[in-house]
Amino acid sequence: MRIVITGTNRGIGLELVQQYAQRDDVAIFAACRHSSAELTALESNRVMIIPLEVTDTASIQQAVAQVQARVSGLDVLINNAGINPSGQQLTQIEPDTMLTVYQVNTVAPLMLTKAFWALLKNGHQPKVVNISSSMGSLTNRTYGGSYAYCASKAALNMISRGLAADLKQDGITVLALDPGWVQTDMGGQGATLTPQQSVAGILKVIDNLTAQDSGAFLRWDGSKHAW
Ligand SMILES: NC(=O)c1ccc[n+]([C@@H]2O[C@H](COP(=O)([O-])OP(=O)(O)OC[C@H]3O[C@@H](n4cnc5c(N)ncnc54)[C@H](OP(=O)(O)O)[C@@H]3O)[C@@H](O)[C@H]2O)c1
């Protein structure tokens, strides 16, 4: 299996690399802005670290070229990199915050999918997994604040639906996936799931994905998430 994962130097992305690296049949392209000691320790002939700033078009092109130099097809693209900065209460929110979060959480997954499309077409049962959030659910939105983050993930869900329709002809399955509330820099230590628990579930969900699941919004444990 040939896999590209974004945002792999820490958090859920790092754990995705860690758990996929335990499999024999994988080539993992671990994309990140700058590596970490933990990620560098995982580097091998099956785990390649590639530089990627997800909001930078040139950086995306360079990442695609690096992957293309090693493999002729891509089986899984996991758009994991994301941000949830402070300053999102109604009293604080500014256009810059809205747009910055949108660039990383919404625009980048679309641009990365577009850029890796040709490789995905050559993949084996290819899948695009957009790491979304329960905070992107309109149904769950009975609280205020977090304007940029919630809107960016709701928009990512919409993009996932569009991609599912556009990529169906190429046999590419597209999923919006909520990893749960996870103990990372973003989730905080009070979160209910360890990265190990969340990612173990995510890997099962990805393994079991079929074309019928394309356009779905699922949780880390495989259950359906309300839109
Ligand atoms: N943790 C949770 O409870 C939770 C819940 C729901 C959804 N999620 C989603 O899960 C994903 C991973 O979150 P996490 O909890 O692992 O967060 P995290 O620990 O804060 O890690 C975020 C990752 O994204 C990378 N990143 C941010 N901006 C980037 C950019 N412009 N270009 C490239 N990489 C960038 C970071 O790299 P740097 O180190 O370079 O900044 C880091 O590797 C996110 O999409 C998040 O929204 C998390």
Image: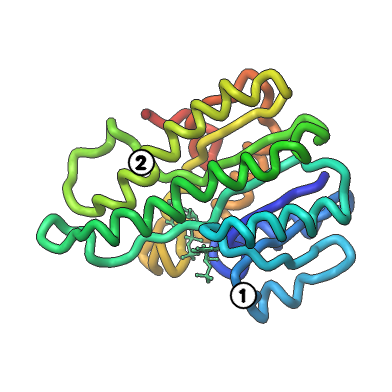
Relative placement, left or right, of 131 versus 86 is right
Find disc 1 in the rendering and name its residue.
Answer: 34
Q: Position of residue 23 (x, y in %)?
A: 82, 53
Disc 1 to disc 2, how far (Cα)?
27 Å
Of helix, strand and loop, which one carries label 2?
Answer: helix
Question: Quick check: 47 left or right of 150?
Answer: right
Total numbered circles: 2
| Viewer-closest of 116 and 76 | 116
Question: Which residue lies at the image location 62% right of the left edge and 40% below the top edge?
Answer: 114
Three-letter code, disc 2: Gly
In the rendered structure, which amino acid carries the disc numbered 1?
Answer: His
Q: Compared with residue 68, is residue 113 higher up or lower down, i.e. above or below?
A: above
Placement of the N terminus among the 4 image quadrants: top right
Q: Position of residue 96 (x, y in %)?
A: 28, 61
Examine the image and state in which quarter residue 56 appears.
bottom right
Nearest the camera: 117 or 80?
A: 117
For the C terminus, give its image quadrant. top left
Q: In the image, which disc is placed on residue 165?
A: none
Question: Which residue is most to the bottom?
Answer: 37
Q: Between residue 224 and residue 101, name the one nearer to us.
A: 101
Mark 2, residue position? 136
Residue at left 25%, top 53%?
Answer: 146
Q: Does mark 1's beta carbon lie closer than 8 Å to ligand 1?
A: yes
Residue 179's spot in the image, x, y percent? 50, 47
Q: Residue furthest left?
A: 91
| Label 1 with label 2: CB-CB less than 8 Å | no
Q: Quadrant of residue 34?
A: bottom right
